[in-house]
Image: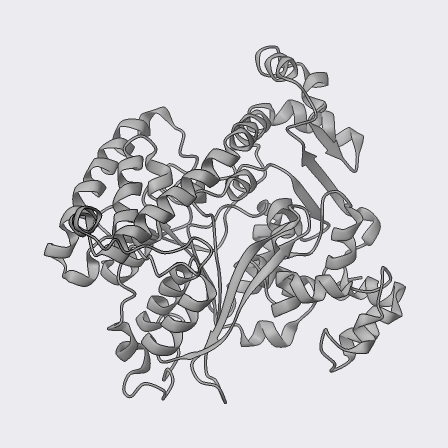
Amino acid sequence: MVMASSTGIQGDDFRYLIVRPDKGGLWDVLKYSLRGDIECGSKFLESSDQGVVGGEAADHRWIILVSIVARRIIHFLGKPMVLTGYGVDFFLNLLSQNGSLFGLFYNLLRGPLQHFCLKQEKPIILNNMLAKNLVGDLHNSTPGEGIKNVELDDQATMDLCVMASKLAYENAEVVRNVVVHHWKMHFVDFYDCWDDYQKKKSTQVFLLCDKPKDATLILISFRGTEPFDADDWSTDFDYSWYEIPNLGKLHMGFLEALGVGNREDTASFHYHLQKRSTKHCYPEAAEVESSNEGPHSERSAGIDKKGIPPEMVEMSAYYVLRGALAILFPIVLVLHDETNLLQKLLGVYTFGQPRVGNKQLWRFMEAHLNHPVPKYFRVVYCNDLVPRLPYDDKTFLYKHFGVCLYYNSCFIEQKMDEEPNKNYFGITHMIPEHLIAIWELIRSLIMGYTHGPEYKEGWFSIFLRVLGLSMPGIAAHCSVNYVNSVRLGKS
């Protein structure tokens, strides 16, 4: 039992549904979409309970179809997306090395052309300056004194959270440089964590605190959806879920990114999530949990399939940090009855986060994160597509929870339960979305003049704005929107 006194979770009741876009053909997709052929739709589904397959295929046909089609298209475009990302990265770094577009042409004609090797650590490319002036606000006085009177609703704390979420998209050396030399804070480490389903290190997270000893603030920042990463977008469109009784249904792809399971071995979710049951079944694992030795000790190295594998301890996000992918962090802490860590949790801020679970999960976590005061805040910018995924309607399972801080394109903040146009793809919103995308492009060109040089947007940001004229929801997910919303936002 994971939380015997409060949840009554039984291991045998764990259920799951996996959507596998590659298990059927184009003809199956057409028959399932046009005729509602449940047998064809069921080919794409795998479940712990075959009775679930037919019901899901019938009740959520269009949502499953969107998941299948979108993920097949993303898979097809995977390599072009990677190559495009490399090309954009190389070009923008070339601009950065040569000062500007004019400088690039001048050096190309007159020489010498400044360039870099893609194998090297890439230089910093952020859409805004990294708000060096925030350092004084964060520390209130002299750098190194630490943040005083830390409160969840403190503006400096929220500024730090949004800047850290943006910084997470840079490499380890850039992160270290900004945290230590610009923010004058203590950089702990940058982790490149393993996703056992994707078989690659696809979860990036860094850890910082306000000072090396007696820290009053510890911050964990996770990288979110990357613009040119097909696996990230495929995960966002994934319908697959894993259900824990009395807690609810959780997005399977995000659990995998957290490092607590692999859909190719669904028993792994049960094993990693049901901590207390694991201790009863495998005393070797309990011994390591209770010891003070690190993951490289002889005792942990001796654990095989009966305990937590050493590679999981060393590489997965949850076991590295005893923390996790944004809002999944407190969810797993509750599941593992980590009451001490939960009591020390100041709060969770997410920026452009997709939906992670169902309404049952919402009710369960509200009881833990809203008392005595709200601790979970979802920041959503205007027409950002990602917070509207996976799809949500009257019968669909994925729901948001927590307080939504919604910012429109003029950076006006509204506190609400759900962002407007919650499913994004409504026909009535298409024209306004594109008009706002035009306004956002114009705004990006004048921000440096209207709000000061630190708000001047870079080439990558402007490039995304141009793409946003045809795909507004993707451009709206750009981190610069969230930084500006927090810094310039008006209630």
Pick the residue in front: 144 or 430.
Answer: 144
Above or below, comparing residue 37 to residue 260 in the picture: above
Pick the residue in front: 23 or 423.
Answer: 23
The quadrant of the rendering that contains the N terminus is bottom right
Image location of residue 288, percent across then percent down: 79, 74
Which quadrant of the figure has residue 308?
Answer: bottom right
Q: Is residue 334 visible?
A: no
Q: Is residue 454 visible?
A: yes
Image location of residue 475, percent across then percent down: 33, 41
Pick the residue in front: 333 or 449.
Answer: 449
Above or below, comparing residue 97 to residue 187 in the picture: above
Which residue corresponds to the image point at 88% horizontal and 70% vertical from the top-left?
283
Which residue corresponds to the image point at 17% horizontal and 50% vertical from the top-left?
110
Considering every residue shown, the one lying at the far left of the view is 449
Which residue corresponds to the image point at 33% horizontal and 67% vertical from the top-left?
159
Above or below, comparing residue 87 to residue 28 in the picture: below
Colour scheme in the image? one colour
Which quadrant of the figure has residue 58?
Answer: top right
The quadrant of the rendering that contains the C terminus is bottom left
Image location of residue 51, percent across then percent down: 78, 29
Image location of residue 253, percent across then percent down: 61, 45
Above or below, comparing residue 37 to residue 216 in the picture: above
Q: How many marks?
A: 0
